Amino acid sequence: MQQIKRVLLGMLALVWATGMWAQDKEILFEVSVSKEKLGLNERLRVDFTMNRDGDHFEAPTFKGFKVLMGPSQSTSSSWINGVRSFSRTFSFILQPTAKGSWTIGQAEITIDGTVYKTAAKKVEVTEAVAKPSDEQTAQDVADQNVRVISEVSKTNPYLNEGILITYKLLVGNGVNVTNFNSVDAAEYTHFWNQDLPINAYNFEPTTYEGKSYQSVVLKRVLLYPQKTGKLSLKPYTFELSVDVPTNRRDFFGRPLYAPATRVATTAEITIEVKELPVENRPASFTGAVGSFDFFVTPNKTALDTGTALEVEVRVTGKGNLKLFSLPELKVPAALERYAPENKQKINNSRTGMEGSISDTYTIIPNFQGSYPIPGLEFTYFDPKAKKYVTRSTEEINIQALGGAVSGEPTNTPSTTPTVRSEGFRFIKLTHQLAPISSGSFIEDLNFYLIWLIPLLLLPILGWWIRYNQARGNDLGALKRKASSRMAKKYLGQAQKALKTPDNFYLALEKSMQHFLKARLSIETADMTHDTIEELLMAQGVSKEVSGRLIELLNRCAMARYSPKKISDMHEDYTAALAVLTDLDKQHQS
Amino acid sequence: MKTRLLILGLLLGNYCLSWGQTNIQDQADAWWAEAQKAYQEERYTEAIEQYQKISQSGLADEALYFNLANAYYKSNQVGNSIYYYEKALLLNPEDEDVAANLAYAQKMTLDQAATPLAPTLGATMVRSIVHWNPKYLKYGAWLGMWLFVAFVVLYRLGGTTRVKKWGFALATLSLMTGLMCFSAEYLRDYWTSKDQPAIVFGVVSIREAPAVSAPELFTLNEGTKVQVLEELEGWGHIALADGTQGWMELSGLKKLRELPE
């Protein structure tokens, strides 16, 4: 009795000690098989269990077996009395392919940098048994027949190209899934994601890994990668409430169901996101990927000043509609432009986002005029054609007509020139076209010629003036010479005109006047008889001679009014000759 | 005698030149009439074509540039429109029609007009110097010189001291006028060569340095008026009205003082 007690105590101590040890996180990595002896037509379940989370699980090659399912993971962690217990199991369902004694090889896992291995396990496969094992528990059945898988529409999309991830529940024969909820929702780091709601859960038969299932889509998520390179989609874990049929029947002969809970995790998916091509990337590319149409539409193009106009910039199509910005509308600075109103009409479907986004600008012209709004360019990348497509719009011309401006626009930018009530001026009707002068006249030789000629003229003019002044001293003599020449000329004329008394006396008088002009340096206007006498006296002419001259002048004057005989004319001519000769003589003396 | 021959030759040369010009003038008149008609019938592209023919023949005046600019405005070519309005203003800064329509054209530009700096005294002076009309300066210089000679002769021949005094005073005044007009033109030419306004065509990037790799400071849209300060291998150092400066490629602008090819 005492001995037994001692042994029990020892065992308790041992258990306690190992418990303590476990609490100190002794790492365990073990293999367990559902049976060590089985028939050829039976299945074997192999679990690799660890009590600490590890990486790089490597299953052994199951020689002699075919993997029906697996690896499927299940994880449980719990806190009991402040002690955390954790366990992760990788399970395989195996089908023997041949009779004999087979060895389940070593599985490997790396935990905290150390590689742990399980022990090899021997399994004996015998002849097929009449009735496959029924000793599976409800949990086993649930584990075998309920699976969750994830499918992606594309594993190598371009950046910003939409992909769809679908989570499917596969339910095997006879098992009912009564409820599910997501335990560990996947996080889509580096993806823009949009949950697509599932309206109805429809089962449809599928085959997966050689086994037929009823499949239902649990969840669909649209993903737009926002980063290039290898991105991993974390596994999604669902907790499923399962009813497993048992072999027992109820009173009415219907099979009885045993409830079970299955925690199912999808596999991790790696997606390789391709960078958009860099070459030939237009400057107007802002990240749109898909296939789009682009419009810029004004609601009117002619309007009164002070009234509003709306211009809509719209992109319609399929692609990452929410994930790029629309090109900004540029308008002449003189137009008032308000911040655009953004509208989105997007349907999310399995093929991606589809619909339109638009920016509506309100524009008010405050002054009349014509305002061109330049066309816009919108570029997107077409992942199907693998090239960039640019859509551009035409320039829009807005005509602001002079019109009812009820009040002064209050928020006119002060810098714009204010031209109000003044219309656009018409072209000029007349011109004064002239050759365009290239540059300045200071490089023009003609200018200098005309400019400097007067300076050259100056010495010439100076010389000319001096010359004339020198001759100017002699001017009296010159005049006298000319006058006596004239006197002789008229005397000659008088001689010729002896037959006609009128002409004779006129010529005689002129001759005498010119003689006196030359002698006395006086002008015809000054010639009165008194002055002539005086001047002649001053020149030392005798009274007798001057008397004869005066008499002769008188006779000439008289002859104009009373006709004379020809004999008188001869007398007068000789008298004139005598007087003039005497005057010359006396003057010279 | 030699001078007389020279003058004769010059006159003859001028005559031949003016004969050639009358031919061009007649042709220009025809183009002008066609352009005016096209404009009135709103065929603006044709009007532009005809006006450009006149411009390329080497003839121009403010009316031509104004009409050309109007035609460009009507066909929504902002840059060209502003370019020719500004050209018309260079010929006659006081023209109200040009100023009014230029305001219209400037409203078509995408850039908000830069607030000009308050002009300094020097800048105002330079601007007024640049606007002096070389034609008047030329005639002023000539008239001054010829009057100078006339008054010198009057001074020499003047009979009374009063006439002589007046002759001397007026001769001095005329000589000064002649010389001043000439030096004024010299100044005008100098400052005009420094004044290089230009109009931006297309959308251009203004950079920190004359290189494509230099960081971009801002962009300018078509129709902006800039002042070219310096040039370096296809790049221009430009300044905006508000004093902002930068470098841009010269292919993106058209200088206002440039003659048609």
Image (cartoon, grey):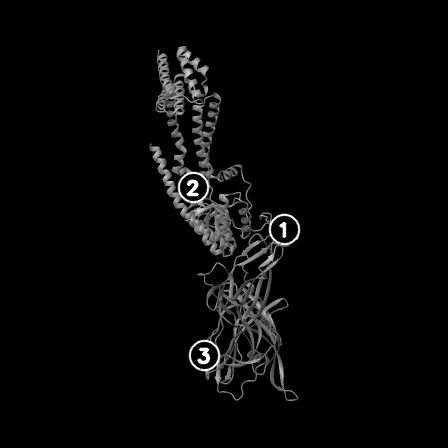
Sequence order check: which comes first, mark 1 or mark 2? 1
Mark 2 residue type: Gly
User: In this figure, which residue is indicated by the disc labeled 2?
Assistant: A439
Closest to the observer: A143 or A51?
Answer: A143
Q: Is residue A217 above or below residue B26?
A: below
Residue at 35%, 33% (x, y): give it. Answer: B3
Within-10-Å neighbours for mark 2: few <14, some 14–19, many 20+ = some
- Alpha carbons under labels 1 and 3: distance apart: 86 Å
Judging from the image, mark 3 belongs to the subunit labelled: A
User: In this figure, which residue is indicated by the disc labeled 1?
Assistant: A411
Q: Is residue B36 above or below residue A18?
A: above
| Residue A52 in view in this figure | no
Closest to the observer: B112 or B89?
Answer: B89
Within-10-Å neighbours for mark 1: few <14, some 14–19, many 20+ = few
Q: Could you tell me if the residues under marks 1 and 2 are in contact, i.e. CB atoms within 8 Å? A: no
User: In this figure, which residue is indicated by the disc labeled 3?
Assistant: A63
The mark lying in front, picked from 1 and 3, is 1
The location of residue A200, given as percent across then percent down, is 61, 76
